[in-house]
Image (cartoon, rainbow, N blue to C red):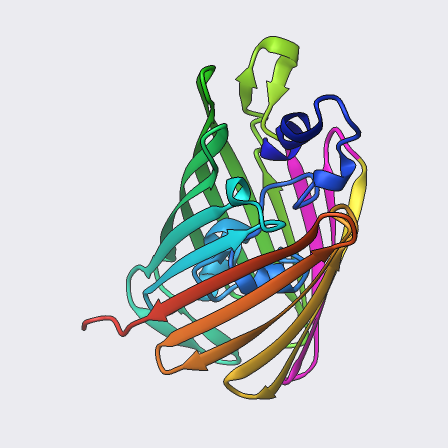
Amino acid sequence: MRLRLLPLLFFGLARPAPLWAQGNGPAGHGARAVALGNASATLGGDVWAAANNAAGLGTLTRPTAGAHLENRYLIASLNLVAAAVAVPLGTIEPAAGQPARASHGVVAAEAQRFGGGLYNETRLGAAYGYRLGVVNIGGRLDVLQVSFQDLGSRRAVAASLGGQAEVVPERLTFGVYLYNLNQARLLDYQDERVPTVLRAGLAYRPSKQVLLLAETEKDVERAAGLKAGLEYLPLPAVAIRAGYASLSQQTTGGVGVRAGSFQFDYAAGWHGVLGLSQFLSLNWQWERKP
């Protein structure tokens, strides 16, 4: 929703395209996904799958909590703060030739707040992911509140579904995510709705050190866009990333460092007109009690 309203806040009726920070769809979370151009439909195994594609929760085997901070174009009113937690259910089952999985799937919750005093969004989401063989499936339910200063608030409920499949195990993965499949309405005036967005992408891993991502994103009311990302691991605990998103015209890059149970990720994005954006995430995993 904010992607359609922000241009009005800044320029009245001016041409909106340069202010689309994330393209047409919901914002990707976790600095890893951002650094990869938000090509996140195929990503999984961490807590931010709860926001990017709930199907990716299916490969998570340890409880995980995360915090995500971002600032766009060095403007305080475009800050976002998010927190998420994911918990595997049941026992962790090893599978021959396949990643281990939680026998009853993984449940997750996420809360986020975007904006400042003039305009802000609050979003609460619950997600679930399950792995069945080489396929992950997942869904998410969001409660979204949009608030304008002196104009009140509006709320909507959005449902989303996602899937991932290993076309070639450990090499090629296909992912798809449909956000707001129920086309939730925020305002009767001009039939203002939360964007309904379809993402579909491929992840190719030519070696254990390299991951290549390509994704397309289509809002039902707007043109499609392309995203691409590259992740390289010079060391097992260090990642270097780069990406590009055509809709936002933003080039991204970042680094990730793992230290014990903690994962630290930083990303930066550059827009030719609007300038620098920065993103920071910290994840913590812990062992489950027997």
Quarter of the image where the N terminus is located: top right
Closer to the camera in the image, 237 or 115:
115
Residue 8 x, y percent position in the rendering: 67, 25
Quarter of the image where the C terminus is located: bottom left
- In the rendered structure, the answer to whether residue 253 lies left or right of residue 246 reads left
Q: Magenta includes 68? A: no
Seen at 65% across and 72% down, the residue is 241
Seen at 47% across and 57% down, the residue is 48
Give above or below for 171 relative to 2: below
Q: Magenta includes 220? A: yes
Residue 256 x, y percent position in the rendering: 53, 75
Seen at 64% across and 84% down, the residue is 209
Which residue occupies the extreme left position in the image?
290
Q: Quadrant of residue 17?
A: top right
Closer to the camera in the image, 254 or 59:
254
Which residue occupies the extreme bottom position in the image?
235
Closer to the camera in the image, 58 or 274:
274
Give above or below for 127 relative to 211: above
Closer to the camera in the image, 187 or 53:
187
Give above or below for 214 relative to 147: below
- In the rendered structure, the answer to whether residue 53 lies left or right of residue 226 reads left
**Number of numbered callouts drawn:** 0
Q: Is residue 165 visible?
A: no
- In the rendered structure, the answer to whether residue 85 lies left or right of residue 115 reads left
Q: What range of the chain is rendered magenta?
A: 196-222
Q: Main secondary structure of the magenta part?
A: strand
